[in-house]
């Protein structure tokens, strides 16, 4: 019996080693380009790019880049034009096509939405191979929008928090190779000593614009059962980024904020049994008339309960198609990847 058990574990070990070796060989054979990753080191910046598998390192003056970012506000009013999409998941090219054809950006990929607000309702990270490109694009667009009197809001979704807490299950192999070439664990490429990391740590999880609440997963009755303060929620979520997951799990905080009824994971609006009476109670407690979410993938922008809930996860993550929600003067418009108006199917 003991001999049989030993042989079994030897076989499993051999298969694991073979699988790992094959996986590593596959990564090693792929040529990648990635970056920049900009590290803040005392009085200088260290920029690292990967070009055709070679790491290019350069030093920059500390004054050449913005290195401090104020926490984003939680609420905005008086906004006449809003665009919203979510769950890009590294599918940069599809996101660009959606934004360009719907005139949020121009043919040169610059902001063209005037004083409007663009909301990315979470999940730029994971799955796709152009996460870094998408992050820097949103970073640039944010600056351009502000100069035009507009605003870009990048809300953090469950996949942002997963990667920031070193849960790399859905990380594309490109970024595994980047980490290997740079000899730096991936979460350290976006920690608080990097420009991207500090920028991410300034982001909100929930915002309201006019009478509309935007959040990646959703707001459940359980989450707000003891009251709700949007500023406190955003502050606590920001602070949680640099807390150890193991430590958070020892206190009720983790279940409330990171559990299935928390704002980044909740999918209750789409479950049988959720009804308009429950929704109306939620809206009244939140003091809004509409909730816009991502996270629960659809084939298109979809509405529920006479547009009281709108889901903007149109499965951009699949790299084939995507849509965007446009809100003008409180009218909700579903727009396709080609920039055409489409009817809501529910």
Image (cartoon, rainbow, N blue to C red):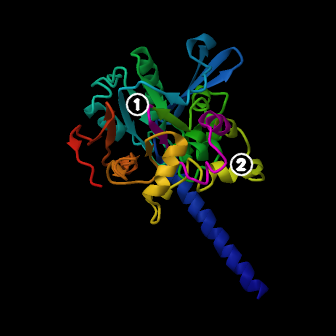
- The image position of residue 254, as x and y in percent, is 69, 50
Q: Which residues are magenta?
A: 210-237
Distance between mark 2 and mark 1 Cα atoms: 30 Å
Name the foreground residue: 304 vs 110: 304
The answer to whether residue 126 is seen in the rendering is no
Q: Quadrant of the C terminus?
A: bottom left
Is 225 covered by the magenta stretch?
Answer: yes
Residue that carries the numbered disc 1 in the rendered image: 118
Is 142 covered by the magenta stretch?
Answer: no
Name the foreground residue: 262 vs 285: 285
Name the foreground residue: 87 vs 309: 309
**Residue 212, placed above or below residue 12:** above
The crowding category of the residue bearing disc 1, from other C-alpha atoms within 10 Å (few below 14, some 14 to 19, many at least 20), is many
The answer to whether residue 143 is seen in the rendering is yes
- The image position of residue 263, as x and y in percent, is 56, 47
Q: Residue 253 bears which disc, if any?
A: 2
| SS assignment at label 2 | helix
Residue at the spot x=33%, y=47% of the render? Answer: 301
């Amino acid at each position: 019996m003991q001999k049989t058990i030993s042989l079994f574990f030897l076989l499993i070990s051999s298969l694991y080693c073979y699988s790992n070796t094959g996986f590593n060989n596959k990564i090693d054979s792929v040529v990648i380009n990635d970056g920049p990753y900009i590290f803040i080191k005392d009085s200088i910046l260290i920029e690292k790019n990967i070009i055709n598998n070679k790491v290019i390192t350069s030093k920059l003056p500390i004054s050449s880049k913005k290195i401090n970012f104020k926490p984003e506000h939680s609420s905005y009013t008086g906004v006449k034009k809003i665009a919203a999409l979510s769950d890009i998941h590294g599918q940069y090219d599809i996101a660009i096509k959606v934004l360009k054809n719907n005139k949020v950006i121009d043919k040169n990929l610059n902001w063209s939405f005037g004083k409007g607000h663009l909301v990315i309702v979470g999940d730029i990270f994971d799955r796709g191979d152009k996460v870094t490109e998408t992050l820097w694009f949103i970073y640039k667009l944010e600056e351009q929008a502000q100069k035009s009197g507009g605003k870009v809001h990048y809300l953090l979704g469950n996949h942002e928090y997963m990667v920031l807490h070193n849960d790399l299950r859905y990380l594309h192999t490109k970024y595994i190779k980047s980490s290997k070439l740079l000899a730096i664990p991936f979460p350290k490429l976006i920690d608080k000593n990097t420009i991207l990391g500090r920028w991410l740590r300034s982001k909100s999880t929930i915002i309201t614009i006019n009478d509309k609440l935007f959040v990646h997963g959703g707001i459940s009755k359980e989450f707000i059962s003891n009251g709700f303060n949007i500023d406190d929620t955003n502050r606590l979520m920001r602070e949680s980024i640099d807390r150890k997951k193991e430590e958070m799990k020892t206190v009720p905080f983790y279940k409330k904020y990171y559990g299935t009824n928390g704002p980044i994971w909740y999918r209750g609006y789409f479950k049988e049994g959720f009804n308009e009476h429950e929704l109306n109670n939620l809206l009244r407690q939140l003091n809004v008339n509409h909730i816009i979410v991502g996270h629960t993938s659809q084939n298109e922008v979809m509405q529920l309960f006479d547009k009281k809930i709108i889901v903007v996860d149109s499965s951009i993550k699949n790299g084939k198609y995507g849509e965007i929600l446009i809100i003008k003067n409180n009218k909700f418009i579903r727009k396709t990847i080609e920039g055409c108006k489409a009817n809501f199917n529910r």
